[in-house]
Image: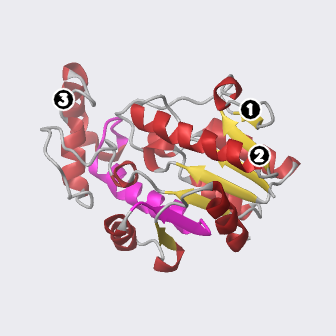
């Protein structure tokens, strides 16, 4: 079995944790006799810990916080994935991280080019929230990820992990531009949820951490039949899951 792993963008704490988990899975699959490819940035091969992992390079970087749409697309990765699938299709594509961590189009592209994708939608905050935290700019926990107007106002304001004072002021001035504004706006957040739902619905299987995450994605419109609670505990369970999808 040939598995193509797609790790997350960025080097934040969450992305590093996901990347370490994915690298361990890649090494485990190799040890079990499977073939493993990895789509990631140039130079990442040294961090994976096994020269047998075949690196497919895509030089992409996380976009600025201010752009809602830009966090959900990644043209270098999308092109690299399409080229790899045309050249030598793997048996399976496994997307680790979703939402701000990866392009929502990756599962759709894999599916359209004939390779079944599995998506790990974890952490769920990264899927549902532009901040990736489900914490608002005041530092309070947020469960109103469906309220596009509230999300836009939250993300237009100044915060330590979002816009600076100057950008927040510009965002306020640009608000009358609506969809033409380069800063977070209500229309972008309406589309964000649609794009997330479309990407996840293109997968053969979507893995989530717990029942609340599953319920949130059902509310978002992801077909219930695609959702599974819990990640496989070991390489053997991952192989069994993959073979079930195939």
The residue carrying mark 3 is 158
**Residue name at image x 31 percent, y 67 percent:** 212
Q: Residue furthest top?
A: 166
| Total count of labels | 3
The N terminus: image quadrant: bottom right
Report if residue 8 is visible in the image: no
184 is within the stretch colored magenta: yes
**Residue name at image x 69 percent, y 55 percent:** 93
Answer with mark 3 or mark 1, whichever residue precedes in sequence.
1
Secondary-structure class at tag 3 = loop
Q: CA distance from mark 3 to mark 1?
A: 43 Å
Q: Position of residue 52 (x, y in %)?
A: 81, 35
- Where is 155 relative to 166, above or below? below
* Mark number, residue 175: none
Secondary-structure class at tag 1 = loop
Answer with mark 3 or mark 2, whichever residue precedes in sequence.
2
Lateral position of residue 72 relative to residue 155, left or right: right
Answer with mark 1 or mark 2, whichever residue precedes in sequence.
2
Q: Residue furthest bottom?
A: 225
The C terminus: image quadrant: bottom right
Q: Position of residue 100 (x, y in %)?
A: 44, 43
The residue carrying mark 1 is 50
Q: Position of residue 27 (x, y in %)?
A: 70, 42
Q: Quadrant of residue 160?
A: top left
* Mark number, residue 30: 2
- Where is 16 relative to 113, above or below? above
199 is within the stretch colored magenta: yes
Whether pointer 1 and pointer 2 mark residues with C-beta atoms closer than 8 Å, the reply is yes
**Region in magenta:** 180-209
Secondary-structure class at tag 2 = helix
**Residue name at image x 26 percent, y 56 percent:** 148
- Where is 173 relative to 177, above or below? above
């Amino acid at each position: 079995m040939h598995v193509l792993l797609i790790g997350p963008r960025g080097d934040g704490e969450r992305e590093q944790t996901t990347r370490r988990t994915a690298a361990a899975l890649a090494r485990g699959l190799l040890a079990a006799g499977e073939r493993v490819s990895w789509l990631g940035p140039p130079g990442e091969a040294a961090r994976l810990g096994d020269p047998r992992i075949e690196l497919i390079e895509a030089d992409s970087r996380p976009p600025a916080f201010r752009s809602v749409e830009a966090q959900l697309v990644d043209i270098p990765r999308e092109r690299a994935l399409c080229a790899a699938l045309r050249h030598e299709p793997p048996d399976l594509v496994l997307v680790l991280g979703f939402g701000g961590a990866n392009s929502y189009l990756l599962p759709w592209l894999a599916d359209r080019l004939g390779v079944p994708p599995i998506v790990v939608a974890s952490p769920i905050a990264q899927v549902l929230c532009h901040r990736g935290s489900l914490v608002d700019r005041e530092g309070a926990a947020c469960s109103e990820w469906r309220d596009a107007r509230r999300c836009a106002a939250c993300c237009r304001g100044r915060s330590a992990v979002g816009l600076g004072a100057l950008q927040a002021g510009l965002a306020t001035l640009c608000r009358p531009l609506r969809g033409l504004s380069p800063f977070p706006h209500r229309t972008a957040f309406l589309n964000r949820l649609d794009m997330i739902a479309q990407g996840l619905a293109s997968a053969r299987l979507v893995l989530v951490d717990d029942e609340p995450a599953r319920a949130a994605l059902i509310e978002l419109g992801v077909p219930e039949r695609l959702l599974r609670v819990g990640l496989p505990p070991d390489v053997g369970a991952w192989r069994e899951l993959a073979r079930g999808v195939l």
